[in-house]
Image: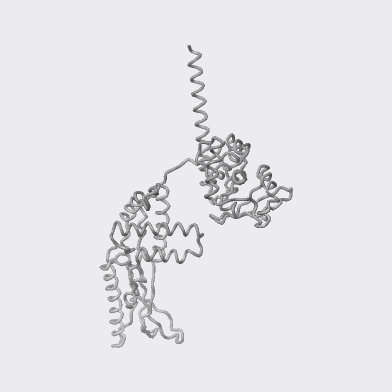
Amino acid sequence: MPVNSTLGVNFFTRPKRNNPNKLDIYLRITVNKKRSEMSIKRDIDVKDWDILRVKAKETSDQLITLNSYMDDVKAEILNAHKELHAERKVITAKAIKLRYMGEDEERMTLLELVKYHNDNMGLSLKPGTMKNYYSTEKYIKAYLLDHYKSDDFFLVDLNYRFITEFEHYIRTYKPKKERKTCSINGTRKHLERLRKMVNLAVRMEWLPKDPFVNYKLKLERKERCYLTQRELHRIEETQFTSKGYERVRDCFLFACYTGLAYVDLKALRKDQLIPASNGRLWIYTKREKTNEPVKVPLLPQALALVKKYTKDEELEVSGKLMPLYSNQKVNKYLKEITEVCQIHKHVTFHVARHTFATTVTLSNGVPIETVSKLLGHTQLQTTQIYARVLQKKVGDDMDALMRKMEARNTKESF
């Protein structure tokens, strides 16, 4: 930042509270259109103040001395600005004022920012979200240690190069031997969290500008895995002798016909089934991820599963709607269930939500705006991912049809 860029130092007055004939003199510091004001602990008679020249009328030695004092204050403010610039500290109106008063703060560091964010946002963010921020913090600490041989980094030194090199570090870093390196989308999530913390620093005036301004987050578009109607029917029709497999299958199918995520189904209680005026049962809940209200009418398949477990003893005690195991156990069982059903896809519980969006709703003509509401999406563009998946499937199916027709035409030509 150039030494005198966007800096303004101006005096102004306010009427004295207990004496309308006197004015208190103040100083206003302006940096990048942001102000900080302070009293210079001097006052003056209204008749002695020159409004146009913004100084005292030099009609007496006392008033000449006052003007000299004001010049000294302004010079010290300009000097405080130069000192902050030379020390590469964040230059704000407040920082200049504090330096002049001898109260300026120490330079904020990156990890101090992370701690401030986590301490203050921990009350408003979900535990799962905070867990992700702690994960990002670990990457930052490891990067600083490996790349800079340091346990912290001055926030004012954060720049575009730091971000790009941090991105490369995340992509190539292996926390443990048995773990893979972070994916492009996983790296993006860490950088999104860092950017949110940096934006906080800019708003708090700990950073003069956003180093992410010219940085573009990379995104790898992945196809959403979902079950076709035939695969869904195969899971429905397969008989399981194990009670555990049957319960996992039923909970998975319930999610396929309601679109509920694992965490939302896990928390779902019987009293959240509300009858409408026509007698149809609706699920009234909120998405744990976004706190968005969700209302889903029970399709016949989902209603049949609810009735199946109406008299389940464990559920009667807990008040829960469905007998859902831990996420890890459910996904382990689903892997074995899909093998039995000869479904050659990587099926996790979340695939049920994708199946609801594609096979159950969009493929059957449900408008995308309605599907978005049923899924509890806050943005329509999130739901549009599923529409693109269906478009690709239509294209693939038509390509297969064209190949068959071309082969048939080739045969007939002989």
Q: Vertical placement of 200 versus 356: above or below? A: below
Along the line of sight, the residue nearer the viewer: 313 or 398: 313
Where is residue 115? Give x, y as percent: 41, 65
Describe residue 310's horizontal placement relative to residue 64 as left or right.
right
Closest to the observer, 225 or 13? 225
Q: Residue furthest left?
A: 86
> Which sits in the foreground, 116 or 169?
169
Specify the quadrant that holds the N terminus. bottom left
Q: Does residue 99 sit above or below 294 in this rendering?
A: below
The quadrant where residue 230 appears: top right
| Residue 81 picture location, percent across and down | 29, 70
Q: Between residue 336 and residue 175, name the one nearer to us.
A: 336
Q: Toward which corner of the image does residue 238 lie, by quadrant? A: top right
Give the side of residue 388 with respect to residue 279, left or right: left
Look at 65% across and 54% down and name the residue there: 314
Q: Residue at x 52, y 34 (%)?
A: 393
* Residue that appears at 29% across and 56% down: 147
